[in-house]
Image (cartoon, helix red, strand yellow):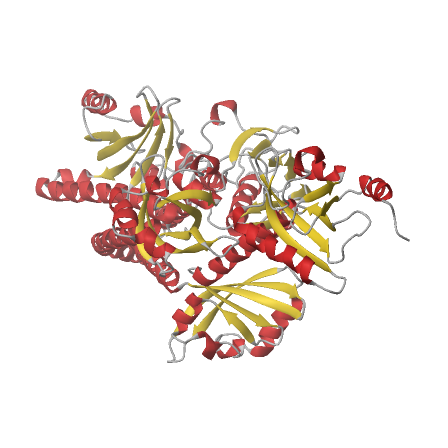
Amino acid sequence: MELTRDQYQELVRTLADGILVVDVSGEILYESPAVQRLTGYAPEERTGDHVFEHVHPKDRERVREAFADVLEFETETVVTAEFRFRHADGSWIWLEARGRTQRATTIGGYIVRISDVTEAKAREERLERTTASFEALFENSPDMIDIHTADGTIVDVNRQFCAAFDQPKAEIVGRKVWEIDQEIEPDELRAIWERMDVGERTEVETVFETGDGTRFPVEVHLTRLHVNDGDRFVVISRDITERKQQLREIRSLKNRLELAVEGATLGVWDWDMRTDAVEFNDQWAEMLGYDLDDLEPHLDTWETRVHPDDIDAVTDALDAHRNGETDHYDTTHRMRTADGEWKWIRDLGRIVERDADGEPIRAVGIHLDVDDAKRDQRELERKTQELERKTQELEDLTTRLEEQYRTLFEEAPVMAVVTRAEDGRPIIEDCNNQFADTLGVEPDALVGTDLAECYTTDSERALIDDGGYEDALNGAFTNESRDLVAADGNVIETRLRAVPQKDADGEVGGTLAMYIDVTERETVKRANERLEEFASIVSHDLRNPLNVAMGHLELAREDCESPHLEAVQRAHDRMEALIEDLLTLARQGEAVAETDAVDLAAVVEACWETVETADATLVVADDRTVVADETRLRQLFENLIRNAVEHSSTSPRSHACGDAVEHGGPDVTVTVGGLEDGFFVADDGPGIPDDDAAAVFEAGYSTNAEGTGFGLSIVQRIAEAHGWDVTVTSGSDGGARFEFTGVEFAAE
């Protein structure tokens, strides 16, 4: 049925899409009201204008060709074109035009239907950019990446994978995974794959073998994905040869250090200068003929035993150090022994902590029995020099261990930055959180700034003046050193890899740059060299006197039986525990580099099984999943459980020796529960005295003669490494309650 012009106009007035009628010259004869909703122009503004007016100059020729097709087709069909159009508000929108090739004779022109496809085009462009970014990340990742099918056939590898095996992609694709992975049998690999669900991630360590027989250890992260033609496994592999070597070196240094200091005959004291509480070790007491349990852990225990003729000189030396006049406190004086005799003691110490006003908080030191040396002055001088040297070496070792372990296991992060080129300058268009966090700047504050502002002077010169950015824009594969400057002025040494970034039209508009932080790798290497040198010195200087001491101990056991011999043996064990906890304390201070979703209840129950808990009871009242380093989280819970169960001398239910905090006992109830932003660990023991609450996390603090005083300090270090806060309060049942806040929980 043929409609009149009025009937056509009434029909199109209700359509969502715009309707135009144009003649053979392109002149607009009619526009429906919907055209104004789409373009912002009223029909009376456009009627009589040319249809190509307001079309983007780059799209105008394509639209003309489409219109020519409308005119030229003899059979009836629909010609479609997409183009940018200037909206009445001055912005550009995308329109799709569909023109019929048959003339509408009733209204005297060709009908063109238009619709707004701006959002669809934007989604299409974002998808293209995202796809290009993922392809660039795959090809230029510093890790080896391969993709294989469910039967183990490799279907794709990245550039780093080819470089590691020194083979082109064509020679690797099509091979089986087990031809490369020489550590895991094919059946075992298939079993791993079959156990994985789609989207699940698995981590293993294995060994790869290159074509020339070279083998190297790798850390493999395997993810199962579903695609149209079946499942695929994406495998990210990292060469961990250097990490393995570092671990071997650490174990070797640890063994030598333990041998060097085991059984050293030093009396150790740790003085809280605010409360005058003092922690003595067994050898300090035995040096004066006492058992440690016979002595009060207070400054009076030392002060009342100093010879009256020596006390003024000792006090003057201590005051001089307290006032900052000396680097350390060092006196030789007489002390009264348990049998009433006087023994010459060399007393060395140092203030290791002051408050904001410079007032001393804590001092540590050692006692050395120099009674025999006083009868031989030359021997005394030799031993004094040796003791001073070893004291300084031990202090240096403590500092080096803390610095090295803080960053030893940190893996170099990958930072990504997208730039756009403006007048030859790289302007930051986007960056990931790793880049922003490394520089200490919010991501939004970086967007729109010149990338060169994040560089050192030399790196900026390499980027701009030496053509580094231009090379990246031209497609040259970039793998160079670049130094970044953080907000606090620190310089971060990195390796840069950059590739050109193309827009939706295929034109290069900027770059995708990736940075690998190599600062920590160099720091750990230098720190390990210093630690090995020091450990060698300590081992050499202490091994001979240690062997002599152990030999005399065995001879003494053959000649007589004495409780003092057992005390010597306990002193050896005590020193070993101190060193072990010291190393653990330093190691736990490192920031967490990698985290996983960890079932809180499961890890607590596993820790409970590994600790001697006697008749104690565990209650877990939180089944959430936290984001944490599982190994270090286990260490945290094990230390807290031991404190509550094994080391409580003041509990009415137990007479066992306490460690850092006395609370609980063999039949104590330990409860792990949830907080709004964290969790807590509580027991129903006698709790913590108010005077001790501020000191329980201090390294070396302990109310137990046998304890090392590092347990709760390790707990605090692990919490801080995760970015958590930890506080100690009294529990609802009167016991100790440790609260951890700022904890991130995994999404359900």
Residue 153 visible? The answer is yes
Image mark count: 0
Q: Residue at x 17, y 41 (%)?
A: 372
Q: Quadrant of residue 272?
A: top left
Q: Residue furthest left?
A: 378
Q: Position of residue 608 (x, y in %)?
A: 61, 49
Q: Position of residue 735 (x, y in %)?
A: 60, 31
23 or 79, nearer to the observer: 23
**Left or right: 505 with respect to 402?**
right
651 or 225, nearer to the observer: 225
18 or 488, nearer to the observer: 18
468 or 604, nearer to the observer: 468
Residue 553 visible? The answer is no
Q: Quadrant of residue 586?
A: top left
Q: Residue at x 45, y 40 (%)?
A: 717
Q: Position of residue 437 (x, y in %)?
A: 44, 41
**Left or right: 216 with respect to 83?**
left
Q: Residue at x 37, y 48 (%)?
A: 407
